[in-house]
Image (spheres, rainbow, N blue to C red):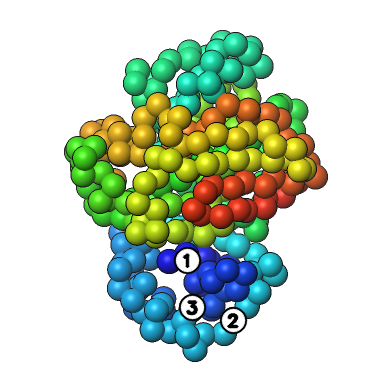
Amino acid sequence: MKLCRFGEGRLGVVEGTTVRDVTPALDILPSHRYPLPTCDLLVAQLGPLCERVRTLAGRAPALPLAGLRLLSPVANPGKIIGAPLNYQKHLEEVRGDPQLHHDNQIAAIHRGGLFLKATSALVGAGEGVVLARPDRRNDHEVELAVVIGRRVRGVPRDEALGCVAGYCIGLDMTVRGPEERCLRKSPDTYAVLGPWLVTADELPDPGNLELSLAVNGDVRQRSSTRHMVLGVPELIEFASAFCTLHPGDVIMTGTPEGVGPIEPGDTLLASVEGIGTMEVAVRAA
Ligand code: MN
């Protein structure tokens, strides 16, 4: 199932070029008072929610997908984990280009580990990217994004895919410069998630998906998730060895080679096989 969020917080199920508005399915989610749980309520109830969506979809209003303003399919992730330098050719391009590494330490992922992006950076495809530091180079990074479905800690890699709720396309936007990675990747709008959540049953093997990104029609990045240094199971094992993963937590799994600068007015077209394609506009602040 492909679940999207659009407009002012509506819920849709994607059927080709049509979206069925199944917002009333959200009524099954529990209402909470402060303090709120540290997970995404929709992802935590994904099984029952999908059941309700199936019941409603047939009689739900059908809208053309093209006209919708898509929001992040996960509204409230507790954390967004990033996988730096998780494609060998991207590691080599960063090591070889001072404009990319800025004399920061460039360690392979086995040694350098993971990083966190602020959840306040999260937007959907329809909201676009607002350049935070126009005085700097700002780069695109297309990635497979994994959405965790269960509360887990210390998951071995051979059980890891059982913890996944689904997948999205992720854009791990980056300001270049000397600062810590987590700061440069956390401006508002620098975590794009979309265009929808594809439930894990539709993508049994996340380790063999083509992914690409074009800027104004020019293809800049094109690779396959089979070239990831640490695959999805290994990334979940690595992350959950350090911290508990909660429903709705997002892991951006790293970008392949071909990262490059973006400018206001650019249109990014990002695709991941089995998920779809999303168009994201870049604008000045
Ligand atoms: Mn990245």
Circle 2 — which element? strand
Res. 131 in view: no
| Residue picked out by circle 3 | 23
- The answer to whether residue 201 is above or below residue 242 is below
User: 217 and 10: which one is in front?
Assistant: 217
Question: Crowdedness of circle 3 by 10 Å Cα count: few (<14), some, many (20+)?
Answer: some
Three-letter code, disc 3: Thr
Question: Crowdedness of circle 2 by 10 Å Cα count: few (<14), some, many (20+)?
Answer: some
- The answer to whether residue 268 is above or below residue 181 is below
Label 1 vs 2, first from the N-terminus: 1
Circle 1 — which element? strand
Question: Taking 258 as reference, is 13 left or right?
Answer: left
- Are discs 2 and 3 less than 8 Å apart at CB? no
- The answer to whether residue 73 is above or below residue 256 is below
Residue 168: x and y in percent read 48, 52
Question: Taking 245 as reference, is 229 left or right?
Answer: right
* Residue lying furthest right: 265
The answer to which quarter of the image holds residue 260 is top right
The answer to which quarter of the image holds residue 135 is top right
Quadrant of the rendering where the C terminus is positioned: top right
